[in-house]
Amino acid sequence: MPARQAVLGMEHASFFYGSAKIFEDVSFLLDDARTALVGENGAGKSTLLKCLTGALELNGGQIVRSRGLRVGSVPQDVPAELAPLTVREVLQRSLERIGQGDDWWRLDVLAEEIGIAPETLDREFGELSGGWQRLMLIAGAAKLEEPDILILDEPTNHLDLANINTLERWLTEEFEIPMLIVSHDREILDRVTQRTLFLRSDGVHAFKTRFSVAREELLRRDATAAARAKLEEKEIRRLEQAAARYKVWAVKNPDLNKRKNAVGTRIARIEADRTQTYVARDRRLELSDGDIDARVALRLANLDVKTPDSRKLIAIDRLTVAAGDRIALLGVNGSGKSTLLSALAAAYDPEREHYDGQAPVRFNPSCRLVYFDQTMQDLPVKSTILDFAATEGTTEKEAIRMLAQAGFAFARLKEPIGVLSHGERARLVFLKMKLLRPNFYLLDEPTNHLDIEGQEDLEEQLERSDVSCLFVSHDRFFTRTAATRFLEIRRGRLVEIDDPDAFFDAQA
């Protein structure tokens, strides 16, 4: 724990991009705990972090920070310019930020502390997996920069379960400093953080407890406020009717004007102190609810799943996916989970009325398949939102309506997809998939960029619909909730298991 008290926060802070409000009248003060910052996609969390670190300036209000405060931070996306540097050169930058660039020996000490081979420091940073790139940046910021407080934006992005467990251990045991952590990973929030801040359009709501408990309390507050506001509205209507009656009666009895004025005063007092209620944006994430007119949706037989250079990853002797099955694929990083999904997507042919009975991949002819690729690299970033959403058989009016339901404002529909956040892009892809009316989903890390509300929408939609689904996810909460079957890739074979917790625990 730092020897002195670290003070960081905001007071009546506001930030606008042009005339667009990102957040307004935000006030909070961090303490010496590990604090979660939670909010829906587009609430302004990443912008708020940039304001705290000084990368952006507020339009109103002020940043509150103790004199000489040293803040360490790791952004959501790994900077592309780091790829050609060595790991040593990347970590050296952390030392240079605090004026200790000559203390090169600290890099070797750090490597020993976090359990990486010394020769890893001389590898190109871009050769590391996306997960280890993030872990290296987090270790550099937390250990080398000696911050008074550490700020992390979506630290579990691109991390597999083993790396998530490593990060969890670092944050709870190795890094004894206050933290502010933005994450949509409900499990990591409950395991790591001790305080919770909710950033919403009505400001920041602070709780001195972990996420799941804090969220229940926030929902209770919202429900209480809504009930109180309803009673106030009912009382205002009753008083307005009374005032109208006194106004009529006062024509014959002027003394009743006093009662009418008194009622008007009561109405004004209630209006002035009226309970403010929070109304979340309507941003429904919906799946198609189509089912398959057969008991079996997919059969696999004698399928070898290989890398592009023909290295065999998985040998599948036989697998049957029943209509309505929701199967979670589990396995260590590099075991072939995503490769299997992409192989199934490549084998699907909507033009076939029947598949060869001897083929290793045989879809039911009534299957309508969609594939969510975690990289979303096929998104046409220069196309407008509306042009992308409009599909054959869908009118522009229908597309606009469904985009509105998914939370895309009409004024933005002519904007290019490239301006959207990762979370907004994921919602757009899910909307496009729904418009294709599928009944079979292949989902590769579908929750990577979805906010917590979006994850819950997806879980609910999968539970309520009769669609079939194979998915890969490092989100432990989502995997437990969404799946009806669990297949683990173990030594190149698919093994069906009863529940995923033993696998999750093994990754620790």
Image (tube, helix red, strand yellow):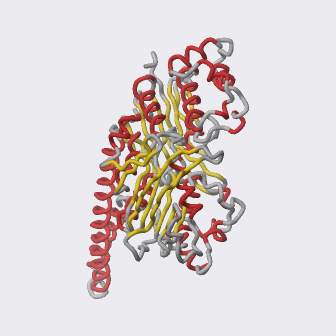
Picture quadrant of residue 279: bottom left
Which is more toward the observer, 449 or 321?
321
Q: Quadrant of the C terminus?
A: top left
Residue placed furthest toward the front: 358
Which is more toward the observer, 174 or 497?
497
Which is more toward the observer, 480 or 484?
484
Picture quadrant of residue 408: bottom right
Residue 474 rendering spot, x and y as whole percentages = 45, 45
Q: Quadrant of the N terminus?
A: top left
> Is 244 situated above or below 234?
below
> Is 241 situated above or below 63?
below
Residue 428 rendering spot, x and y as whole percentages = 57, 63
The residue located at (42%, 72%) in the rendering is 289
Q: Is residue 433 left or right of residue 178?
A: right
The total number of labels drawn is: 0
Residue placed furthest toward the bottom: 252
> Is 297 situated above or below 22?
below
Residue 315 rendering spot, x and y as whole percentages = 49, 49
Q: Is residue 282 visible?
A: no
Picture quadrant of residue 72: top right
Which is more toward the observer, 415 or 307?
307
Q: Is residue 196 visible?
A: yes
Residue 161 rendering spot, x and y as whole percentages = 45, 39
The residue located at (51%, 29%) in the rendering is 150
